[in-house]
Image (cartoon, rainbow, N blue to C red):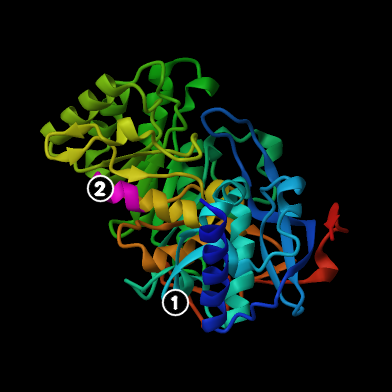
Amino acid sequence: MNRRAFLKASVSAVAAGAGLGLSPAARITRILIQKAKGRRLTPVAPNAYAPYRGYEVAESIVRIQNSEGLEGIGPATAKPEVLKALLGRNAASLYRWEGEHIVGVAEKDEVMVSQLFGSDIALLDLIGKSMKRSIADLLGKRVRENVRVYDSSLYMEDLLKPDELDGLAYLKGSATDDPVERVARKALWVVDQPEGIKILKIKIGRVKWMESFDAALQRDIAVVKAVRRAVGPDITLFVDGNDGYKSRPLAAADFAEAVAAERVYAMEEMFPEDKITDLREVKRRMRAAGIATKLADGENHRDGIPLNICAERFEREPLFDIEQADMNANGYVRIQAIAGTRTKYGMTVAPHNFGSKLGFWSQVHPGLVTPNWEFCETDDSQFPALRAEGIQIRKGLASLTGAPGLGVQLDDTKLEKPSTMIE
């Protein structure tokens, strides 16, 4: 880009923001990084690769403040030297605009904004507050008024040790000696919570923790059947293997066939996504058996499933149906670009999010404006320092209440002291 074009793009971006209510004089003046400690209502039991992780959880938060006294917050995923480059900048000038919507990053800032990862959530929160508009309304025209939410807190509760069972919320008044039943009890507890969530993700792939692959497979099957019995026919179930089937990929088809009556919506990350031949055979067997279960993956790469794999087909459908690139690793502009690309392959998107309430609340906004969006991922983590007054969940559907920006406020009294201050 030559100097004249550079200056024209910069002036146009600021002017676009100014025309929508953002003062072109507003400049980023200070950036803080602070930690918010939290606690889950139920502990994180083992999954396919990790042991018991307990109740404790924390969010690292970036706070981007401007000369007008406004502040945007988001996950602190960027390095301090990248954040420092934001000082003195007008937030709106970092983006390309078409009318009232952000459609990309300003060409001269593409590298820097990419290095922010999910911290661009804080930038859009700041812009939204400046313009008195939600982030959803910055990102595009709404295609739905609410977005489906799923709970991902069902781990391998059947593998909990005796000293890890004390005080479990889902066993109060209903203790059981059957380890499989423990998972079912937790599933029932989740769907009975006030949010009314109707979609559950179940962790499977127990081979690391059991005496044999066959024993692990049978336990995976038993857990899904028990959960279905507990929650009834109207709750959507899908499973996450965390690559636990990598030693026997075709056993994923055995699993799918064994739980066909449970109508599993999707199987996530059963084994590495580059095993194309095995994936094709798993899908062939499922479709031959009349099983409509989808395949999902993508959390292990920032950009999600590699494009050469997205292009793989099974007859008239994509080999992978659902893209799960991580929300906090990408932020808004990148996650929308990923969603747009996946449309070309006939795929939907359901960004990955682990242990982050900011990641969940952030997902709601693009979920309202992205046509091929599946659902948003949450869990039972609680953060006293974060108040999502702009987002509500009713009957398993998340919507906005009208608050500007992200719709999340901080309680300074419940945050740790800043670990980083840039000004």
Q: Nearer the viewer, residue 221 or 324?
A: 324
**What amino acid type should be assigned to the residue bearing mark 1?**
Glu
Q: Position of residue 154 (x, y in %)?
A: 50, 46
Q: Nearer the viewer, residue 217 or 397?
A: 397
- Is residue 100 positioned above or below 225 on the image? below
Q: Quadrant of the C terminus?
A: bottom right
Label 2 residue SS: helix
Q: How far is the residue under mark 1 from the one under mark 2? A: 25 Å
Asked if residue 241 lies left or right of residue 314, the reply is: right
Q: Residue at x 17, y 28 (%)?
A: 285
How would you rate the neighbour count of disc 1 (Cα within 10 Å): few for under 14, some for 14-19, many for 20 or more? some
Q: Position of residue 49 (x, y in %)?
A: 56, 27
Q: Quadrant of residue 197?
A: bottom left
Q: Quadrant of residue 4?
A: bottom right
The tally of labels here is: 2
First in residue order: circle 1 vs circle 2: 1
Q: Residue at x 25, y 44 (%)?
A: 345
Residue 403 visible here = no
Q: Position of residue 139 (x, y in %)?
A: 45, 68
Residue annotated with mark 1: 100
Tag 1 and tag 2, C-beta contact below 8 Å: no
Q: Say whether residue 371 is magenta.
A: no
Q: Nearer the viewer, residue 166 or 260?
A: 260
Q: Position of residue 142 (x, y in %)?
A: 36, 73
Give the residues drawn in magenta, as a range. 340-346
Q: Quadrant of residue 386?
A: bottom right
Residue annotated with mark 2: 344
**What amino acid type should be assigned to the residue bearing mark 2?**
Lys
Q: Residue at x 43, y 24 (%)?
A: 216
- Is residue 161 positioned above or below 329 on the image? above
Label the magenta part by its dominant secondary structure.
Answer: helix
Residue 325 visible here = yes
